[in-house]
Structure formats: C-alpha cells, structure tokens
Image (tube, grey):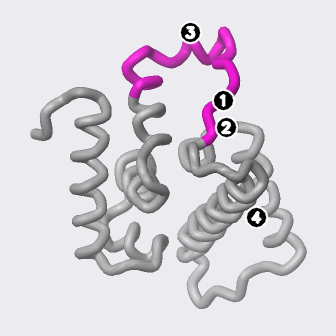
C-alpha cells in the first residue's frame, strides 16, 4: 500500500518502519485486538501523506514522484500493463489514489475505506467513480 501511495520502495519502507517503531515504543490502546490491522493501515496512510507533503515542500512542485529508473528485476516482474496502471495512479490526485489503492489493492470495503480515510462511505464511492473515470481516460480506455 505504501509503495503505491508514495511511488518508491525506499520511502514506503521508511514510512512502515516508522509506524512499527512508534508502535513498539508506545503500543496503541485499543479496545479490540482485531482493530490493530486497521490502526496500522491508518498510521501508514497518514505516514505516506506526511512523506508526500515533505516531498512536495522540498521539491517545490506538485508532480508525483516517478522512480528514476525501473530496475531490470522490476521490469521483468511487472508487465507493461501494470506499469501503465502504476503511472496512471501516480498522476491521480492524492485522495483518489488513496481510495483506489485501499479498495482494489487492499480489498477493503467502502465502509473500511471511509474509516481509514476519515470520510463518509458516499464520498468514498463518488471519489472512486471519479478516480476510475480519470484513470480510464489516462489509460485511453472507455469506462465500463
């Protein structure tokens, strides 16, 4: 999830590691241990948002981060279609990208996505509809 949101593996690993270090130092107080995964997802999402804000402020531009070069291993493992979808996702606005990643890559329900993002389920659905439309036009395909 973090790689899809920030666009590079090194930053994603840093974000996830920071979350686990914070949790190690001060474990979350949860009523139900089953909520731990949702807590971690939300913490990683917030960490990714913070990393992107820092990157935007440092670089002074709004462009999403593009990895400088895909490694040979990545090029072999990822098909061209998947790379195109990744590029299309990176060009979407942050909120739309987050909604799609949470829904389709993590397979969360609309209600779970709304809890993680802190928005209403109806807003999740409309955001995903706009995101899918934008992604389809970005990839040159009609919306189904």
Q: Residue at x 13, y 33 (%)?
A: 142
Mark with earlier residue (1, 2): 2
* Mark 4 secondary-structure assignment: helix
Does the magenta segment cover residue 79? Answer: yes
Mark with earlier residue (4, 3): 4
**In front: label 1 or label 4:** 1
**Residue assigned mark 1:** 67
**Residue assigned mark 3:** 76
Q: Where in the figure is residue 108, as x and y percent of width and height? A: 38, 59
Tell me the number on the disc at residue 19: 4
Q: Residue at x 68, y 19 (%)?
A: 69
| Circles 1 and 2: CB atoms closer than 8 Å | yes
CA distance separating discs 1 and 2: 6 Å
CA distance separating discs 3 and 2: 17 Å
Q: Residue at x 74, y 45 (%)?
A: 11
Q: Residue furthest front?
A: 60
Q: Where in the figure is residue 117, as x and y percent of width and height? A: 46, 71
Q: Quadrant of residue 122?
A: bottom left
Position of residue 103 relative to residue 135, above or below, is below
Mark with earlier residue (3, 1): 1
Does the magenta segment cover residue 107? Answer: no
Determine whether, in the image, residue 123 is placed left or right of residue 82: left
CA distance separating discs 2 and 4: 17 Å
* Mark 2 secondary-structure assignment: loop
Q: Where in the figure is residue 70, as x and y percent of width and height? A: 64, 18
Mark with earlier residue (1, 4): 4
Q: Where in the figure is residue 126, as x and y percent of width and height? A: 23, 65
Q: Quadrant of residue 9?
A: top right
CA distance separating discs 3 and 1: 16 Å
**Residue assigned mark 2:** 8
Q: Is residue 1 visible?
A: no
Report the magenta residues as a range: 65-84
């Amino acid at each position: 999830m973090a790689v899809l949101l920030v666009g590079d593996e090194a930053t994603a690993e840093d974000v996830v590691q920071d979350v686990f270090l914070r949790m190690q130092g001060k474990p979350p107080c949860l009523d139900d241990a089953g909520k731990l995964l949702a807590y971690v997802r939300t913490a990683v999402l917030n960490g990714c948002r913070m990393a992107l804000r820092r990157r935007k402020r440092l670089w002074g531009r709004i462009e999403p981060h593009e990895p400088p070069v895909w490694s040979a291993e990545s090029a072999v493992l990822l098909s061209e279609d998947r790379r195109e979808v990744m590029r299309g996702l990176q060009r979407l606005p942050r909120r739309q990208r987050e909604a799609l990643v949470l829904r389709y890559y993590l397979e969360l329900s609309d209600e779970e996505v709304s809890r993680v993002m802190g928005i209403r389920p109806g807003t999740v659905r409309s955001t995903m509809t706009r995101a899918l439309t934008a992604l389809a036009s970005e990839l040159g395909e009609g919306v189904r």
